[in-house]
Amino acid sequence: MRFRGAILTAASLATPMVAGAQPLTGLYIGAGAGLHLPQFPNVTPYAPGFGTGKATLNENLGFNSNLAVGYGIGNGFRFEIEGDFARSGVRSLGGTPFPTATSGTVGTYGVMANALFDMDVGVPWVYPYLGAGAGYQWTRLNALDSVEPGGAFTSTTSATSGAFAWQAIVGASFPVPNMPGLSLTADYRFMDILGGAKYDGQVNNAGVITPAVLKLHSQFDNDLVFGVRYAFNAPPPPVAPMAPAPTATPAPAPARSYLVFFDWDRADLTDRAKVIVKDAAENSTHVQVTRIEVNGYTDTSGSQHYNQGLSIRRAQAVASELVRDGVPRNVIDIRGFGETHLLVATGPGVREPQNRRVEIIIR
């Protein structure tokens, strides 16, 4: 619980820095592994004839791993289901009535549902993210053997019990150059597995075996996780503009053009936009058409990478509407230019309606 305030403070400080969202749309998968740092949970041992005691389960550093499948909704938010596993060795069980020299392992595994938000802070090679999750975790105390110095008194516990858990996540992803959809990840996770789980064991006191119970209180775990993530619907690399025609080439026939405008951060057509597209489709039947260029553009708000993908989605939406209005698909060329070729010159990060457009050129 002591890290909850720090996590919330980090989230509040990071929020004003958000300039946009990393474009993660559709299905993705991820995997990771790293260092497991448990915070020595308190335990309550009980054995008839010895009473109820207080102890601390002192664990060594261990390892963790996880697998996740998720879905991004395109505005920075993504949701995932994660399976995880962590394990650490036991150094000692300090307290009474159990002795202090201890061996064994503690393993945790379970399923978490996470909600995360990817941030674009204006640096194309790193995207910080914040997240939180809730789920269920099982804890396995395996061969937890406590031996009194001299060996006359021993206790043994090997059992599994589960409890509700929540976690907070702070991390960053690092896109791999020239490999759309592939990113390396690094994050810190704080997990609280709620206490109350009870484990049945036994006490051997000079040959007399007595049942015993070990109650495990809340487990606070810190994990450093390094992984890899792949998004299946990543936008393609930016399309280079076509080179201008040589001066010796005869001038092309006059072209007709139409402009279709979009709302901010949207790629769906308004009713007015559909009327313009329909007009362009009808006029294309009155001339000798060799091709129809559909070029998408954005304003300068958001990252260049995100705007490139958004301009392509806008062009695809207009092309699909042209096909519905009777234009053959094989005469349509679709291109996205992102925030280049602005209709109204602006600086970075400006929401300009005239720049959020698709141009239809009939040649």
Image: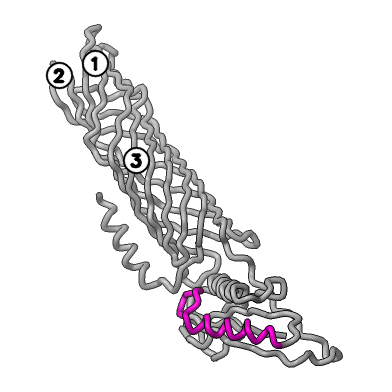
Q: Residue shown at 39%/36% (left/top)?
A: 109
User: Residue 6 appears at what percent x and percent y?
Assistant: 30, 58
Can you name the residue that lies furthest to the top here? 207
Q: Secondary structure at mark 1?
A: strand
Q: Is residue 308 visible?
A: no
Q: CA distance from mark 3 to mark 2?
A: 28 Å
Q: Which of pointers 1 and 2 lies earlier in the amino acid sequence?
A: 2
User: Residue 26 appears at what percent x and percent y?
Assistant: 51, 58
User: Residue 106 appears at what percent x and percent y?
Assistant: 36, 31
- In the rendered structure, which amino acid carries the disc numbered 3? Pro
**Would you place residue 52 above or below residue 175 in this image?**
above
Q: Which of pointers 1 and 3 lies earlier in the amino acid sequence?
A: 3
Q: CA distance from mark 1 to mark 2?
A: 10 Å
Question: Which region of the structure is painted magenta?
Answer: 263-286
Q: Which of pointers 3 and 2 lies earlier in the amino acid sequence?
A: 3
Q: Is residue 170 left or right of residue 127?
A: left
